[in-house]
Image (cartoon, coloured by chain):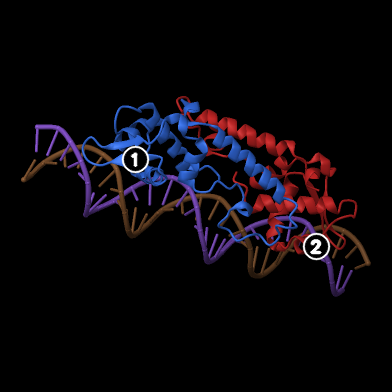
Chain colours: A blue, B red, C brown, D purple
Amino acid sequence: MVISTKGRYALRVMLDLAEHAGEGPIPLKDIAERQEISKKYLEIIVKDLVKAGLISGSSGKGGGYILDRQPCDYSIGEILESSEGEMAAVACLSSDADACPRASVCKTLPLWVEFDRVVHDFFYSKKLTDLL
Amino acid sequence: MVISTKGRYALRVMLDLAEHAGEGPIPLKDIAERQEISKKYLEIIVKDLVKAGLISGSSGKGGGYILDRQPCDYSIGEILESSEGEMAAVACLSSDADACPRASVCKTLPLWVEFDRVVHDFFYSKKLTDLL
DNA sequence: CTATTTGCCTACTATGTCAATAGGTAAATA
DNA sequence: TATTTACCTATTGACATAGTAGGCAAATAG
């Protein structure tokens, strides 16, 4: 974490798509207008969502983006992680960081592990449909 | 949030002081050596803790830092907030940011509010003594 | 088959925060 | 009086964030 603009926008894009599910591909232009977010910036957001396999895009006239699954089958956690990367609250827990040499003696590490679990459970237990 | 180095170090300083409570003022030099953190950087950390009224410093020979209360009377939350500032997971909730004009229509805001509460409760229910 | 609409791609940039260093002054004691 | 300690202001390099700019590729409507 923290939850940055990128992750928050990603969630709003997913919500927007969920609200217009079944209407065929939704152009980014429409989402940008409704959500009052720069279309250019949204391009970056949706790119990550496509790469993560959460949505699909189609080019050309009549194109746009659609959800790959039912809205109830998306957890908030996976949406945030898709756009923000790993959701580690502290560097000690990040897998790409070198392991802390003090890990075995660190009295604070268990706290971060526990917190990480709380955060993870919170976001993965919530579904996209819970926000509709 | 996120919990940065500053907050994590602050917690380790507080723990170190708790472990040596009753031994009189603890010089920063000793903490720096035990915790393997640059003394210069720790100066910044303890400054915030002093300002927040969590610890007190005394100059001169035999000087150092002491806890102002019993270790059990400090919550982890107040230690982190003292060194990191307000613990808001998303900008939408930060009090110093201008209020978001979309707040009244935003479908994601309640999620952030709820998450903020979970995080707050987690850290404020934990005491310094829980880590000893 | 052409114009238009849409997604997709690479690059660039300004701003700010983080993590830390540097060099000094003030206070207190042995 | 020398030494030890806290305390103060400034500076820096690295990195992430939050965007912008401009163009190419694909697909459809006419």
Q: Residue B46 placed where, x, y %?
A: 73, 53
Left or right of B67, for residue B110: left
Residue assigned mark 2: B30
Q: Residues within 10 Å of mark 1 (few under 14, many from 20)?
A: some
- Above or below, comparing residue B80 to residue B9 in the picture: above
Left or right of A71, for residue B69: right
Q: Which mark is residue A56?
A: 1
Q: Residue B12 carries which label?
A: none
Q: Residue A95 placed where, x, y %?
A: 57, 55
Q: Residue A87 placed where, x, y %?
A: 55, 46
Q: Which amino acid does label 2 sit on?
A: Asp
Chain letter, disc 2 residue: B
How many numbered marks have been drawn onto this rendered protein structure?
2
Residue at 55% across, 44% down: A2
Q: Residue B42 placed where, x, y %?
A: 71, 58
Are discs 2 and 1 located on one and the same chain? no
Q: Is residue B94 visible?
A: no
Q: Name the quadrant of the N terminus of chain B.
A: top right
**Residue closest to the eye, A41 or B48:** A41
Q: Is residue A109 visible?
A: yes
Which quadrant of the structure image shows residue B94?
top right
